Image (cartoon, helix red, strand yellow):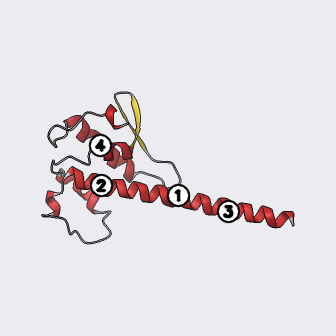
């Protein structure tokens, strides 16, 4: 699905893709954990935010300072990347956010599975 997005050019993202990344970060920040993965739109197409993060994994552009906080606030361990955290690339941010999306989706799916198992056990007990 990433082929609907503009390609990187020698590791650099066009402005439209950087703007879409910003929208995806905003959608991630507003994500209610009981709702499916947030979406963004690009040229009339609806895309899950993970698609945008995947498209930016190879981007070597430096993150703008005003967007950096949205990423660093979510780090649960001290920064150990190459260079200063102020020099974080879109690639690193996209990888971090991609992992966070997968973790949240997994946690939601796990909670759904646990709830379904509980309902099934209750039904089995009621049948006895």
Choose between 41 and 11: the one closer to the eye: 11
In space, the residues marked 1 and 2 are separated at their CA atoms by 20 Å
Secondary structure under the numbered disc 1 in the rendered image? helix
Disc 1: which residue = 108
Q: Residues within 10 Å of mark 1 (few under 14, many from 20)?
A: some
User: Residue 24 at x, y = what percent?
Assistant: 34, 45
Disc 2 crowd rating (10 Å Cα; few below 14, some 14-19, many 20+) is: some
**Given this view, does label 1 or label 2 mark the residue nearer the observer?**
2
The disc, 2 or 4, on the residue closer to the chain's N-terminal end is 4
Q: How many marks?
A: 4
Q: Position of residue 101 (x, y in %)?
A: 40, 54
Q: Which residue is mark 3?
A: 117
Using a 10 Å C-alpha cutoff, classify the residue at mark 3 as few (fewer than 14 neighbours), some (14 to 19) or many (20 or more).
few
| Side of 61 where 92 appears, left or right | right
Residue 65, picture quadrant = bottom left
SS at badge 2: helix
Q: What SS does tag 3 mark? A: helix
Mark found first going from the N terminus, 1 or 2: 2
Circle on res. 95: 2
Q: According to the image, label 4 marks what residue?
A: 55
Which residue is located at x 41 percent, y 51 percent?
30
Q: Nearer the viewer, residue 31 or 122?
A: 122
- N-terminal label among 1 and 4: 4
The CA distance from mark 3 to mark 2 is 32 Å
Q: What's the CA distance linking mark 3 and mark 1?
A: 14 Å
- The reply, left or right, for residue 73 in relation to residue 28 is left
List the single residue furthest toward the top: 44
Contact (CB < 8 A) between labels 1 and 2? no
Q: CA distance from mark 2 to mark 4?
A: 10 Å
Distance, label 1 to label 4, CA atoms, is 24 Å
Q: Quadrant of the C terminus?
A: bottom right
> Does 22 appear above or below 100?
above
């Amino acid at each position: 699905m990433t082929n609907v997005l503009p390609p990187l050019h020698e590791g650099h993202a066009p402005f439209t893709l950087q703007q879409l990344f910003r929208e995806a970060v905003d959608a991630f920040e507003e994500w209610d954990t009981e709702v499916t993965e947030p979406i963004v739109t690009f040229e009339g197409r609806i895309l899950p935010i993970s698609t945008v993060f995947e498209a930016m994994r190879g981007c070597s552009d430096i993150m703008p300072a005003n967007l950096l906080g949205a990423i660093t606030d979510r780090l649960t361990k001290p920064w150990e990347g190459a260079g200063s955290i102020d020099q974080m690339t879109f690639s690193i941010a996209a990888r971090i956010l991609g992992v966070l999306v997968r973790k949240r989706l997994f946690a939601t799916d796990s909670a759904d599975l646990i709830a379904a198992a509980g309902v099934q056990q209750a039904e089995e007990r009621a049948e006895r």
